Structures are given as C-alpha cells and as structure tokens.
Image (cartoon, rainbow, N blue to C red):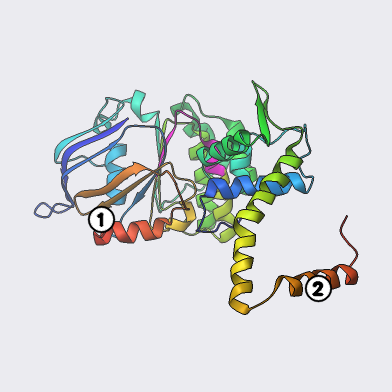
Amino acid sequence: MQFKDNKPIFVQIAEHICKEILSGKYSEGGRLPSVREYASEVEVNVNTVNRSYDWLSQRNIIESKRGMGYYVSLGAVENIRQSLRETFFQETLPELIMQMKRLGITVGEVEQAIERSQNASTPER
Amino acid sequence: MISIQDIRFGYDKHQALLDEFSLEFAQSGIYGLLGKNGTGKSTLLYLLMGLLRPQKGSIEVDGLSPQNRQPELMQEMFLVPEEYDLPHISLSKYVRAVKPFYPRFSEEILCKCLDNFEMPTDLNLGELSMGQKKKVYMSIALASNTRYLFMDEPTNGLDILSKSQFRKAVIDGMTDERTVVVSTHQVHDVERLLDHICIIERNKVLLNEPLVEEEKAIDLEELFIQTVDGRRI
C-alpha cells in the first residue's frame, strides 16, 4: 500500500478499508482481519492499525465483538457513503467552486457538461 | 526495560566513541535506532548484548548486567548482526544446536517465517547468498522468541520484495512483551513499523520518544535531518 504525506497513516488505512467495504471485499456483518493480520498485510505497526480500527468504530463502520474480533457494521456502506458525501460538500466542492471562479466557468456551463456526459455514457446504477 | 547509565566506551584507549552516554528504553515495542555512520549504533547493540563491556558506567537489562552473561538474561536476548558467517551445516542441525538456549523457541514460528521469506526448510547454511543468509538468520531470531531482539541494519542486502517480507515477519513476530531494537540508516525501510524513535549522535541522545502521528504522516527522514542538524532542538 502506498501512503501519502499529507494525512496520518492511520486515517489513510481507515479510508482504504472503507474502499474495500464499498467494493464488497468485506461485506456488512462479515468479519475483518485481526489488527495484527491487517498490520502485516499493509506492513505497518500494530498500533497504527489499532487507531484505524478505533477511527472506523467511532464512525459506526465497524464494531468489535468481545473476544471475536472486528466485524463490518450493518449499515456500514450507507455510513461510508454519508461520510464521503460530507467530504464532497466540505472539501471537493469548495475546491471545484474555487477553480470555477478562477476560470470564469458558470454553473450553467457545468450543468450542460454534466448533461452531455450523462447522455454519452450509461449511468453506473 | 533497558537502562544505560553514564557509560564510556572506546575501541581506542585514548578516544571514546561513547562517553557519559545514557539511554533508557522503558517500554516494550519496536524501537528505531537512528544515527549517522560511525555514531556507535552497532557498538551500542554489542554493549547491550554483553559482547562488549563499558569502560565506565552501567548497563542493565531487566535489572541484570549483560556483561555478566547470566543465562537467565542471555536466553532473553538475540542479536542479528549486520554481517555474519553461518557454519556449513543443515538448518535442522543448526536449530537443534541453538534451540536449547532459548526456552520459548518455536519451530512453528520458524517455519512460518521461512515460508514468508519463500525459503525452504531443508537447506544448508553454507550454500546461501547474503540475502538468503539474512532471511534464514532473521527467521531463527524471531523463532527464538526472546524478550529482546536486536537487529543491526536488517534490510541491508535485501531486495524490495524481501524488505516487504521482512516487515511482515517483524509484525507477525511481535508480542506485547517484546522489545525490538532496529538500528538502521535506511529509514524508509522501517519507518511504518516503529513505536519509538531514538536518534543518537556522538555521545548524545538527540531524540528518544514514541512515534505518534497527529495531523499528517511522519516523514522520518525529514525528522532525522532536522534533529541531527539541530534545527529542532
């Protein structure tokens, strides 16, 4: 796994696990690898993965069952989508708006472009 | 618990490599021992193993002095030096010879480690390349299950895939009781493994603290350069 410098490793690992849940590698109600197994897989310190799992637990994406390890929470996919939506509106969109202002692109133009691309490709869902 | 108090050591009578040097590793976990070439990283590991003796001061590991080489301490310590020769005998013969010295030696861990390194178990120690020798000896070190494991430049001579296997092996072999000290100047090979970071420079410990990331990932190379250049202290 490749890491970037601008974010803590434990958050990057947590986000990676989110992607794995969205892609169906780990399904809702299914068991996650133990902290040590996952640490070995991504080659980081066990405590780092512990923090990732805590981070995910706090966001109701995974939960620990005493003595049995960690499981993907029911509703995890929806929780991840919700949190990604928040990221979109808090981070991605403001950046986009900045870009649009800088380049003088209007909302109308963007709407048209979205319509064109939707017509050109079949929607994902 | 490792405690080094005001030691002096020099290979030359008139020139001390370490003088009034003190250092403490109080908790278990993985320590990165960093320092420029010739700052005494390897010497420090030999001193901790009792292979060298301080000319002044004291070293204690769990309250015992390694230079006395008492079995109850020696059976809890293992050193993987940077370079070493292995005898021209089969691995199984070697393991039979080494195993009695380490009460918790685990052949299961040995097999798992060798498997992780993609090494067979039926091999002759005399017929190995440098990298293979490292992998086999490191597997024995991890299998010995000692409370203290010292590794001097463990990633030297390993290719990219083997470095990744090495990291996995160390993580798999860690327990809460274990203290692993890895001396290296290849910071990037081990930076994600470490619980603690210790930077030494002639006679001085510039930094000895737990690695906890906050806002962003810690760039150990940057931290090292800043610390050694004194910009951070």
Query: Residue B103 placed where, x, y %?
Result: 47, 24
Which residue is at 58% across, 50% downward? A12
Tag 1 near tag 2, CB within 8 Å: no
The nearer-to-camera label among 1 and 2 is 2
Residue linked to disc 1: B39
For the N terminus of chain B, the image quarter is top left
| Crowd around label 1: few <14 · some 14–19 · many ≥20 (10 Å) | some
| Span highlighted in magenta in the image | B169-181
Instruction: Say which quarter of the image contains residue A75.
Output: top right
Residue with the most extreme top position: A66
- Label 1 marks a residue whose chain is B
Asked if B56 appears above or below B35 in the picture, the reply is above
**Which amino acid lies under the numbered mark 1 shown in the image of this protein?**
Thr
Left or right side of B146 for A91 = right
Q: What's the distance in space between the residues labelled 1 and 2, CA to CA?
A: 65 Å
Asked if B46 appears above or below B26 in the picture, the reply is below
Residue linked to disc 2: A112
Which residue is at 76% across, 47% downward? A22
Q: Is residue A80 magenta?
A: no
- Label 2 marks a residue whose chain is A
**Which amino acid lies under the numbered mark 2 shown in the image of this protein?**
Gln
Question: Tag 1, which secondary structure?
Answer: loop
Which residue is at 24% across, 42% downward? B52
User: Which of B12/A21 is in front?
Assistant: A21
Q: Is residue B172 magenta?
A: yes
Left or right side of A34 for B97 = left
User: Which of B186/A108 is in front?
Assistant: A108
Question: Tag 2, which secondary structure?
Answer: helix
Left or right side of B181 for B226 = left
Tell me if residue B36 can be seen: no
Query: Residue B188 placed where, x, y %?
Result: 46, 57
